[in-house]
Amino acid sequence: MEPIIIEGTAKTPTVKFDSTEGVFEIKGRSIPENSVEFYKPLVDWLDTYKESPLTKTVVNIRLEYFNTSSSKCILDVFKKLEAIHKAKNEVEVNWYYEEDDEDMLEAGEDYESIIRVPFKMIEIIE
Amino acid sequence: MSFNIENYFSDLSAGNTILYYKGNVDSDVINHVLDTVEDKMVAVNEQSKLRKKVYNVLVESLQNLYHHVDKVPNDFEDQTAERFGLLVVKKVNNGYRIITGNFVHAENIERLEEKIKRINRSSHEEIKELYKFILNHQRISAKGGGGLGLVDIARKTGNKLEYSIIVYNKNYSFFYLDILVSEEI
């Protein structure tokens, strides 16, 4: 399947979803007014990917800011990953946060408590 | 009787105002406000923790206006704005104050006030749980909002949501939200 490669903007993140690599990434700022429009293609792509995923999928989330409207879309992304994990494939989420950013760490912990996929919280030390 | 949205807060323009905006709130305005406030905070070397909180709260307040404002009353001075909002950002001793103002249709006031009261009587832990509950159970509305904006603001600031509702006429009220993002919480 075709990879998704999206360059980041001031309001939307950089995205790399490549089914041949098994390491996916969402990075930067996610604060669009219409987050569904941005995330729907990603969720749809994962829906197709989950039909024949790699045995191991690693997802790196490295966000500087995200708005509450993106937070629901990110949950939708995680729900797809949860389905892949439930079908006995290895899935790992690496949630990055800057060292003084407790809000971002807490946001990661929120997802970890909702989604049944192993999360790793990784502090970025500058 | 005349109604002046700016006179309502006696100190709205007083003090160290770093940004003042009144008019249509569209995507470009939001970008511009975010850039301006971020640049000003960087210029005065604001600590990154406070800077991020202010930025986050500003995003949510502006997008609340973008997604939820009701149409302005027919006799209001500015009829050009599709989404009319007021925004003031002030530097205060212990952080930043973000004040927003917008018209709310009379039929929506009670629900809005109930929501704020519920948030304000909740402890920090309860707000965290409420956030997670809404995140996990509520779909994005037709207007595009996630219903999480105010909860997120209360959670990130750790402060109560100060607000006022001023009756404009029988169909409309003007709603002010006054958020304090303090340095150490």
Image (spheres, coloured by chain):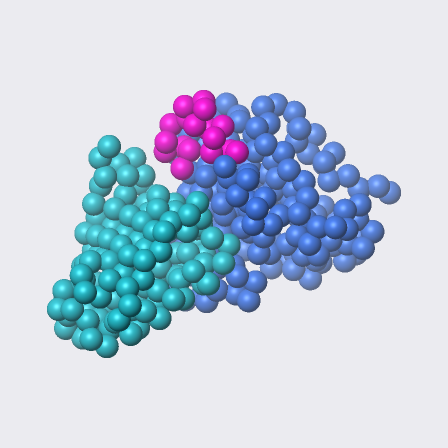
Q: Nearer the viewer, residue B97 or A48?
A: A48
Q: Colour of chain B?
A: blue
- In percent of width and height, residue B116 lies at 55, 51
Q: Give the range drawn in magenta.
A: B36-52
Any part of residue A86 in sight: no
> What residue is drawn where x is 74% and y is 34%?
B7
| Relative side of B40 to A20, left or right | right
| Relative side of B74 to A110, left or right | right
Any part of residue B41 in sight: yes
Q: In which quarter of the image is the C terminus of chain A?
A: top left
Q: In which quarter of the image is residue A99?
A: top left
Q: Is residue B96 magenta?
A: no
> What residue is drawn where x is 52% and y is 65%?
B141
Q: Quadrant of residue A82?
A: bottom left
- The rendered magenta stretch, by its main secondary structure, is classed as helix
Count all numbered tags in the image, as a single digit.
0
Single out the residue that lies furthest toward the bottom.
A51
- Compared with B149, A36 (above or below) is below
